[in-house]
Amino acid sequence: MSKFSQRYGYMPVEKAFQREFADTALRTKLWNVLKVTIWDRYDHSNYSLRSTSENIDLMLKRLWFHFFNKDLDTLPEFYSRGRSQGGYDQLKEHFFNCEWFAIYDFIEEISTQSNLLDETAREWINTVLEEQNAAYRFVGEEIAEITDKQEILAIEDALEHPEKAVRIHLEASLRMLSDKQSPDYRNSVKESISAVEAACRLVAGSESSTLADALKKIRNLHPALSRAFNQLYGYTSDASGVRHSLIDESNITYADAKFMLVACSAFVSYLKVSAK
């Protein structure tokens, strides 16, 4: 279930997408991936895991030397046998208390400086990042931004549209896309294109026009741009799309829904400026 702040639009767009921000849920899920794929395989007493355990020890030493810039004389054993913190405890404390960007530095350091974070683990991390609406993904062995500031600014600008009907559709689209528990990509796309439809009707001065008819009535709109949004509308109207039947199964993904929200937000803002 989405939070109150998300349902009623009080959460900033940048936080909804977790850009330059990482909440506790995201940190916890990422740590759990590292725990299952790496930390839980540390066991020197198990012959089959001895090589992995030695790799983890070596990685810890590299992190101590290159990443944390700490004195190697202070390097603890991976698991503590007394009251003092072991390497595992110190890594976990750092992960949950560091700045948001240090999380990605840490994961990237493990990926590039060891063979412990394999392709399957990186794919799992990418799944978590997508589920939690983080603006970053593994691309090869490095983490790259996939939801940039300009996309977020486009959405924020459109959400300030003076027409309530346009804002309601965009807010609903963002809420459905950003819901971490049960995202609704199909209806997010529907709300995005409905925002364009509402904005076009407003500019065309016709509340009952279809999107195609409203686009024709907008002065000085380049024909290529008009055709592009007619085609986008068609994409959401075919048999496998979202507007044909909301109960039919759809293959719409997070990427589809995010693209539609960004593209439709940018067009709504364009119409707002051009109408003046």
Image (cartoon, rainbow, N blue to C red):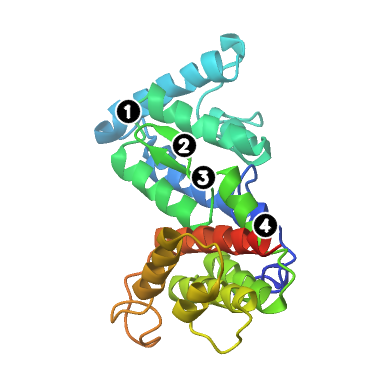
Q: Are marks 4 and 1 in contact (CB under 8 Å)?
A: no
**Distance between mark 3 and mark 4 Cα atoms:** 31 Å
Which residue lies at the image location 71% right of the left edge and 66% below the top edge?
Answer: 161
Q: Amino acid at mark 3?
A: Trp
Q: CA separation, marks 4 and 2?
A: 22 Å
Marks 2 and 1 sit apart, C-alpha to C-alpha, by 20 Å
Residue 54 seen = yes
Q: Residue at x 43, y 62 (%)?
A: 223
Q: Secondary structure at mark 4?
A: helix
- Give coordinates of residue 71: x percent, y percent: 61, 10
* 65 shown above or below 6: above
Q: Which mark is residue 115?
A: 1
The answer to whether mark 2 and mark 1 are in CB contact below 8 A is no
> Looking at numbered disc 1 in the image, what kind of residue is underneath it?
Asn
**Total tally of numbered discs in the picture:** 4
Mark 2, mark 1: which one is toward the viewer?
A: 2
Between the C-alphas of marks 1 and 3, the distance is 18 Å
Counting residues from the start of the chain, the first of labels 3 and 4 encountered is: 3
Please identify the quadrant where the N terminus is shown. bottom right
Q: Nearer the viewer, residue 97 or 141?
A: 141
Residue 109 % position (x, y): 47, 26
Q: Amino acid at mark 2?
A: Ala
Task: Report crowding for label 4: few under 14, some 14 to 19, many 20 or more residues within 10 A (C-alpha).
Answer: some
- 63 vs 232, left or right, is right
The C terminus: image quadrant: bottom right
Give the structural element (helix, strand or loop) at label 2: strand
Q: Which mark is first along the chain, 2 or 4?
A: 2
Residue 156: numbered disc: 4
Q: Earlier in the sequence, mark 4 or mark 1?
A: 1
Residue 79: tell me if it is visible: no
The residue beneath circle 3 is 31
